Image (tube, rainbow, N blue to C red):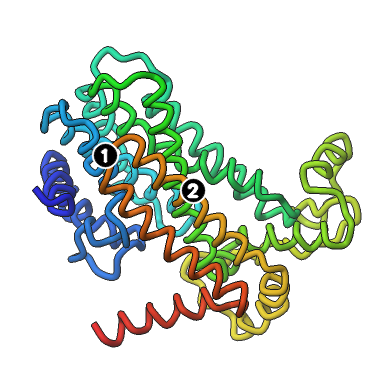
Amino acid sequence: MDDALWVDELYKAFWRTLPGMLHADAQGLAYTLGLSPSRDVPWSAVFSNEITLAAPALLAEAMPGVRGATVQDALLAHLLAVIEAFGTDRIKDKQVRPTWQLEAILAHARRARDEALRRVAPGVDDPAIDFARADDATLFAIETERSLLASGGPAGFSRYYALSLSKQSVGFPASIALAHAAGWTAERREVLARLLSSVWLGLQLHDDVMDWQDDYQRGGAWAVVLASELRSRAHGEPRAEERDRERASEPPRHRGAVAYGPLGTPPWGIAATPRAQGEPPTPDAPSSLLPVRRMVLESGVLAAMLDGERRCFRAARRRAAVLGARRVAAWAEGREGQAQELARCEAESPGFANRAHALNAWAKAVLA
């Protein structure tokens, strides 16, 4: 069965197990979460790539001895984990209203996810396939990231990578459980974990480049934080990690509810004040973004992030080839080439990636 069709059929089978009063809300969940323009868009069409929702199915070709029913359970566990994580993130970020229907659907998704995972690797005791542990890591990373972006302090790429990977924690258990079912050694499972890390981080880097202006308007953007760090280092200031150690013993200075640091003034990395849900943008929003946009573009951080994306997908391609996951390797190779070209164009013409992204979105909307 085609992976996209498989995803949609499994999700349909899931929502049909729910109480009847939740069926309509479950069918339109992607729309409710702001991930699709209408209730009619199936989950397989929500993301621009297959691997986000169907990673275990794509990896299964490297595990020929695993039964189809086991792959199906791994796919179900993975897609429900991803959907639930998006829902939880949207609620915590106040992008959606936490209705009782939404919270009930997400609770059912967690239970169905956990049950499916137990069928994939029954009796296996491995922290890497523990969804409860992954949930905790994801929530902690989301809260830490939100605090960091709101504080306005600069941070380096190492912090960004660590938090970004922790946010993707639920993207690992199902595929690693499938590797257990295939009888893979600990060494091969470690290569798989590194492959998944490269994939999820590469996708995160891409999104954080393309969406940085919207993210900033909603409360904070990594491109701004990283650009602020590059700017500080260009002026001879210590690295963010060194400043963190120095400030750990100092009481923060406060202005209102936000701690700005030793001088009590917001640095370049300060996040835009988030608007209440449903509040229209202020007329001067575009002009207020101009100095921040100038700083981001002059720093070269977007080209650096895109080059990081390229390196992630290069690593993913190589690791997938080692494991015999040819479809994943081919997909990663394509993404590697795209990232390389985007990074080159962004370095030559700062702002190119965002202009190209906006033009592509316009073309899809107008020419569809």
Q: From mark 2 to mark 1, how far is it between C-alphas?
A: 18 Å
Binning the other alpha carbons within 10 Å of mark 2 as few (below 14), some (14 to 19) or many (20 upward) gives many
Q: Is residue 220 visible?
A: no
Looking at the rendered structure, the kind of residue marked 1 is: Leu
- Kindly identify which residue carries mark 1: 59
Q: Is residue 28 above or below residue 210?
A: above
Q: Residue at x 17, y 55 (%)?
A: 24
Viewer-proximal residue, 323 or 145?
Answer: 323
Percent position (x, y) of residue 194? 45, 36
Which quadrant of the structure image shows residue 237?
A: bottom right
Q: Is residue 352 left or right of residue 128?
A: right
Q: Is residue 292 left or right of residue 342?
A: right
Report x, y in % for residue 121: 25, 20
Residue, x 49% and y 43% (percent of image)?
167
Name the residue type under label 2: Leu
In this rendered view, identify the residue nearer to me: 281 or 323: 323
Q: Which mark is residue 191?
A: none
Left or right of 181 on screen, residue 303: right
Tell me if residue 223 can be seen.
Answer: yes
- The residue where tag 2 is placed is 201
Residue in the image at 42% along x and 31% along y: 191
**Vertical position of residue 303 compared to residue 323: above or below:** below
**Residue 91 x/y as whole percent:** 44, 51
Tell me if mark 1 has few (under 14), some (14-19) or many (20+) residues whose alpha carbon lies within 10 angstroms of its own: many
Residue 141 located left or right of residue 89: right
**In the image, what residue occupies the spot 65% across and 66% down?**
272
Secondary structure of the residue carrying tag 2 is helix
Where 135 falls versus 92 (above or below)? above
